[in-house]
């Protein structure tokens, strides 16, 4: 389907151990979906598989962007196809400045022989940094090196906004953030929300969803989605806790 | 930004660009193998003075007596077969002063390597050596008027013995090691430079060394004398085609910085992967003088090179900044030597090595500060970057400090480019090669800021080429 991120009956394992078990999800452009669930249920695995991480084995199923399968593609090809992953633990790249890194990432999207126009690039970069309340001195700092948790996450959102992806997957972007940083990050994401873009927001806590209000909330347990609802489902989970999910769906999983 | 594009155009040397050769056409050929006859042939062709003839023949005896340093060095040295090498090949002994007078195949070679273009853009003078002799040598006229001498080794010894003979073979004696002895016997080409008192060269002088013939040994000899208060930057580059058989490059480079003079010597070594690169480099710094080696080793099969500075006068400074990149099948065995011989002398060594795949890099350092000296300082930093698990890196720093008031600081680190870092960068759209290249550039970034702009641009291009080639 055009204008949709589709995950169809995905089975994924690592070292012979099944992690995703018949996982299906469909997110049309213009919508924000939240994926919640207890730790160790496969949320981060899903994010990495979507981005083409080679450690995981896809046993069956498919992942499609705008109707085109991205399974088996290299991570850079998937990135160029329009999928961005905001990492739970962004990597430090010593000696590579933020400005040069994002520039290289943008350059990789241009046709052979075409060069980035530096003046326009910096104008755009500074505008987006201002929106995310990132000090301009950051452009010269080594990517993520010595950054606080909040700085790393803001830097992920900065990269996301600079690369203009169609599908944004955000893996635990709220972890390690204080309330002020959480607001800034959420504002940055909300600015990017539009009819041409879809979001999958993976989170353990409901807190982030007060600021990034989702259209649909999914509850994941033991490798698949067990329950879906509107934004109120997140609040319900917050009240009842994940034990409720475990009790409610463990039998069903065993049966499946 | 347009400036950096200009630089990109100015420098066109990359690994593949050097991989071509022209059919051999030499008037002078010393044949295969090394005997007294070979040395006499070289001396006859060059019309050496008697003292130079004697110098060569004595050096040959020392070379024969000296053992290979395989007790500590790479055993790959055993694969050099001295009796299968050709020691002298040339089309003539006098370099042309205009590119128009250079033989067509040689001219085309250097044009493909971009040398005449670089000369026009930012150099004060160029010497281009093709196998044993320089085919072209030219310095800007105003420097000649100021008394700067920029000639080949034979011309330097024949025409200006009063200037060069007192220092020739004094910073690096013939018997220093087996390969300095070999060079002393067979030397040909290289640059002899004299900068008069107080003359400061604003643009660099450059030598480019090209090996065109197979089974060949190139033995250039360089001696730079910077008289009191003068300043010079010298740059050397090198390439060779990728032959099946091994090629030997064994140079001797001596630098003499007299009182308050400054010499900066920059090497971008990009030999093809069949070249044994065994080079002895040492500078002497008098009172208040500075000798700085910037040494980048990207190519070759085995490089053994430990640029040194003898800090002879009060307040002298020595520096070695080096980058070595060892790809599959390569061993970069590099380092630095600092000999403190006077009070208040300072030395600085920063070494960055990158090992990829089966590549291997070794750092060997030697810092010597005797007991009677005061206020001497050394700083040594060795950082190694490993890309994939088969790479190997070794560090052998030897620092002897004996004085009470001397300080030495040593730091070493080993880091890896992890699969997760590569995945992170690829998720942003970079190919695997681009991601590795960016990580390597990040690793050497701080150090490269100390390099002149033209060379950091070239070095970055070479690293990109190497990293693209190492994916697979």
Image (cartoon, coloured by chain):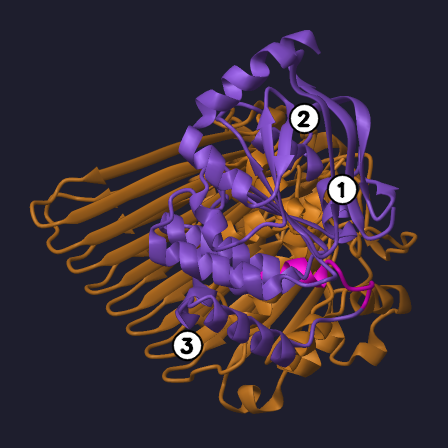
**Magenta highlight range:** A101-113
Residue A171: x and y in percent read 55, 41
Nearer to us in this view, B448 or B322 = B448
Is A111 magenta? The answer is yes
* Most distant residue in the left direction: B404
Tell me the subunit letter for badge 2. Answer: B
Q: Are marks 3 and 2 in contact (CB under 8 Å)?
A: no
**Chain rendered orange:** B
**B21 relative to A203, above or below:** below
Nearer to us in this view, B103 or B302 = B302
Residue highlighted by disc 2: B79
Please rate how many residues cluster around mark 3, counting C-alpha atoms within 10 Å: few if below 14, some from 14 to 19, many from 20.
Answer: many
* Gap between marks 3 and 2 measured at Cα: 41 Å
**Among numbered discs 3 and 2, the one appearing first in the sequence:** 2
Nearer to us in this view, B48 or B298 = B298
Could you tell me how many numbered marks the image carries?
3
Left or right of residue B7, residue B381 in this image? left
Q: Are marks 2 and 1 in contact (CB under 8 Å)?
A: no
* Gap between marks 2 and 1 measured at Cα: 16 Å
Please rate how many residues cluster around mark 1, counting C-alpha atoms within 10 Å: few if below 14, some from 14 to 19, many from 20.
Answer: many
Whether marks 2 and 1 lie on the same chain: yes
Q: Which mark is residue B231?
A: 3
Tell me the subunit letter for badge 1. Answer: B
Q: Could you say whether the residue bearing mark 1 is in a helix, strand or loop?
A: loop
Q: Which mark is residue B86?
A: 1
């Amino acid at each position: 389907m055009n204008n949709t991120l589709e995950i169809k009956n995905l089975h994924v394992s690592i070292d012979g151990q099944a992690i995703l078990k018949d996982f299906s999800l469909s997110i049309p452009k213009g919508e924000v979906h939240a994926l919640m669930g207890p730790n160790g249920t496969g949320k981060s695995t899903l994010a990495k598989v979507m981005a083409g991480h080679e450690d995981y084995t896809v046993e069956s199923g498919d992942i499609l962007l705008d109707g085109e399968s991205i399974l088996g593609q290299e991570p850079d090809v998937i990135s160029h196809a329009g999928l961005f992953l905001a990492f739970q633990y962004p990597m430090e790249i010593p000696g590579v400045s933020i400005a040069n890194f994002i520039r290289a990432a943008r350059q990789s999207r241009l046709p052979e022989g075409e060069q980035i126009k530096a003046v326009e690039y910096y104008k755009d970069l500074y505008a987006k940094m201002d929106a995310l309340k990132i000090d301009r001195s950051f452009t010269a700092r080594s990517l993520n090196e010595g950054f606080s948790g909040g700085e790393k996450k803001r830097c992920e959102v900065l990269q996301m906004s600079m690369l203009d992806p169609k599908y944004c997957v955000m893996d635990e972007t709220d972890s390690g953030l204080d309330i002020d940083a959480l607001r800034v990050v959420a504002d940055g994401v909300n600015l990017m929300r539009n009819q041409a873009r879809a979001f999958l927001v993976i989170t353990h806590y409901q807190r982030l969803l007060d600021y990034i209000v989702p259209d649909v909330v999914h509850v994941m347990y033991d490798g698949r989605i067990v329950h879906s609802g509107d934004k109120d489902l997140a609040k319900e989970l917050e009240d009842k806790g994940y034990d409720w999910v475990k009790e409610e769906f463990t039998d069903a999983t065993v049966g499946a | 930004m347009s400036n950096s594009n200009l630089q990109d155009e100015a420098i066109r040397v990359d690994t593949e660009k050097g991989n071509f050769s022209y059919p051999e056409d030499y008037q002078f050929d010393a044949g295969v193998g090394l005997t007294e006859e070979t040395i006499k042939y070289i001396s006859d062709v060059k019309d050496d003075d008697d003292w130079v003839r004697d110098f060569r023949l004595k050096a040959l005896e020392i070379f024969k007596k000296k053992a290979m340093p395989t007790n500590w060095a790479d055993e790959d040295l055993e694969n050099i077969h001295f009796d299968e090498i050709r020691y002298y090949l040339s089309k003539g002994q006098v370099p042309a002063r205009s590119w128009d007078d250079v033989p067509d195949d040689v001219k085309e070679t250097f044009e493909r390597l971009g040398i005449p273009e670089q000369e026009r853009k930012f150099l004060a003078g160029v010497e281009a050596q093709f196998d044993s002799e320089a085919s072209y040598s030219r310095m800007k006229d105003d420097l000649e008027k100021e008394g700067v001498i920029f000639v080949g080794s034979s011309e330097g010894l024949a025409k200006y013995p009063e200037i060069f003979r007192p220092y020739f073979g004094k910073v690096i004696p013939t018997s220093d090691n087996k390969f300095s002895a070999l060079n002393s016997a067979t030397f040909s080409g290289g640059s002899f430079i004299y900068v008069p008192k107080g003359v400061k060269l604003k643009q660099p002088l450059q030598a480019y060394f090209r090996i065109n013939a197979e089974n060949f040994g190139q033995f250039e000899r360089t001696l730079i004398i910077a008289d009191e208060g003068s300043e010079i930057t010298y740059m050397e580059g090198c390439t060779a085609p990728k032959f099946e058989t091994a090629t030997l490059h064994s140079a001797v480079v001596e630098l003499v910085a007299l009182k308050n003079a400054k010499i900066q010597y920059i090497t971008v070594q990009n030999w093809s992967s069949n070249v044994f690169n065994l080079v002895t480099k040492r500078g002497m710094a008098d009172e208040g003088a500075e000798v700085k080696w910037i040494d980048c080793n990207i190519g070759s099969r085995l490089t053994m090179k430990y640029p040194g500075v003898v800090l002879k006068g009060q307040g002298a400074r020595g520096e070695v900044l080096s980058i070595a990149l060892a790809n599959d099948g390569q061993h970069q065995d590099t380092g630095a030597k600092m000999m403190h011989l006077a009070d208040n002398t300072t030395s600085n060594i920063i070494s960055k090595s990158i090992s990829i795949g089966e590549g291997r890099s070794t750092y060997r350092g030697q810092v010597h500060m005797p007991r009677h000296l005061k206020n001497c300082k050394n700083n040594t930093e060795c950082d190694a970057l490993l890309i994939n698990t088969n790479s190997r890196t070794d560090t052998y720093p030897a620092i002897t400090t004996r004085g009470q008031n001397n300080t030495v600081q040593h730091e070493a680190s080993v880091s890896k480019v992890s699969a997760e870092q590569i995945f992170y960068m690829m998720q942003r759209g970079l190919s695997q090669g681009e991601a590795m290249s960016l990580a390597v550039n990040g690793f050497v970034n701080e150090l490269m800021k100390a390099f002149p702009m033209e060379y950091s641009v070239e070095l970055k291009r070479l690293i990109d080429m190497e990293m693209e080639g190492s994916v697979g």
